Image (tube, grey):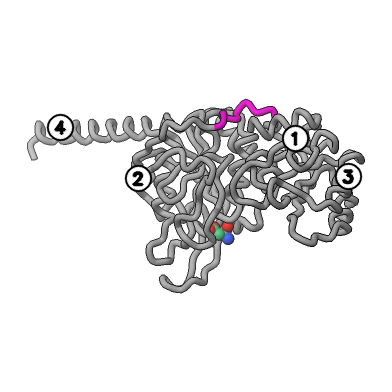
Amino acid sequence: MNIKLQKSCYFVVFFITISMLTAAAELPGISILATGGTIAGSGVSATGSAYKAAVNPVDKVIAAVPEVNNIARIRGDQICNISSQDMKPEYWLKLAARINQLFRLDLADGVVITHGTDTMEETAYFLNLTVAYDKPVVLTGSMRPGSALSADGAMNLYNAVAVASAREARNKGVLVVMNDRIYSARGVRKCDTINPAAFNDRENGPIGRVNYGKVSFNNRSDKKHTYQSLLKLPFFAGNLPEVPIVYGYAGINPQMVETICKSGIRGLVYAGVGNGNPSEEVLNVLAKASADGITVVRATRVPDGPVTLDAEVDDAKFGFIVADSLTPQKARILLMLALHKNFARADIQQFFFDY
Ligand code: ASP
């Protein structure tokens, strides 16, 4: 090769390297915070149903989808590696602190959380109330482990990174991306135990779609973003109070509810029948608990519709709060945070309508 040709080759290689570096630097920075779940799981057979969740570490989960590196600068971080039936407030606090730190220090443009699907909606809603920035935070997972035929985790992760990278995803609250659809934290819930199309928001539907990484939000307006929520937490938040959920049913034993009320709790969510109704005997127990200073929230076991104030139950008289359209498990999260911050009942009731 003559000297002139060699020089031009060097120049071309140099130019390509610089352009590649510049292009990479322009990609959004996305932190993937891994918590476990089926997306990190594995089974022995591609067609058998048996598998173990939360076996692969974050690096392996990301390495299974190298395409994410074409759309973002990826950084992985292991928060925990558990099945989400083992999720607890301790990990919620860790996640919230980590995300707030990443955004405060400008270390990420968006965050994706890989999570088991069983309690994904609870973590999403907790973060919706406690992340203090408007940058995208997206939870995703999978219904099938990577070892299964037609596993859904890889595309879900790719799509979640695409949504977390999208400018339009800002200021929309914490999002859940599953099976090509984008949901808001407040309304999303797991509605199927085994199907990959497991998630839905029965009241509002999805707020957008993501197809092979192409993100589109629909125009339906959503509850306001809660990054300025009065429930956000300091970095060291301490322990959240214990708040049990009591599930209502025909013939419920009021003594069982009384025992729970006497166990030192500060608040309780009653997942009542119909419009959050307790039986007369349970009503008496809850009324006494409320008078003794326990904050009682009426939610419902019915899938659709809000729990409304002062219908069959005189909430004003008993000092009860209604959960509006929050599921019992999300009502519990809001109540834990509100009690932790010592808000008055009237404020807490307003939070249920606003957040
Ligand atoms: N039990 C699993 C979990 O929630 C299910 C899943 O991830 O789909 O971790």
Q: Name the residue rendered at 75%, 28% in the picture.
A: 347
Q: Nearer the viewer, mark 4 or mark 1?
A: 1
Q: Please give the residue where the numbered disc 1 appears in the rendered image.
A: 338
Helix, strand or loop at mark 2: strand
Q: Name the residue rendered at 83%, 36% in the picture.
A: 319
119 lies left or right of 76: right
Helix, strand or loop at mark 4: helix
Q: Earlier in the sequence, mark 3 or mark 2?
A: 2
Q: Which mark is residue 7?
A: 4
Crowd around label 4: few <14 · some 14–19 · many ≥20 (10 Å): few
Mark 1 CB in 8 Å range of ligand 1?
no
What span is in magenta?
223-230
Q: Name the residue rendered at 43%, 51% in the picture.
A: 179
Q: CA distance from mark 1 to mark 2?
A: 37 Å
Using the rendered view, name the quadrant where residue 33 is placed. Answer: top right
Using the rendered view, name the quadrant where residue 292 is placed. Answer: top right
Q: CA distance from mark 4 to mark 1?
A: 68 Å
Q: Earlier in the sequence, mark 4 or mark 1?
A: 4
Q: Nearer the viewer, mark 3 or mark 1?
A: 3
Q: Please give the residue where the numbered disc 3 appears in the rendered image.
A: 289
Q: Amino acid at mark 3?
A: Ala
Indicate the quadrant containing the C terminus: top left, top right, bottom left or bottom right: top right
Q: Please give the residue where the numbered disc 2 appears in the rendered image.
A: 211
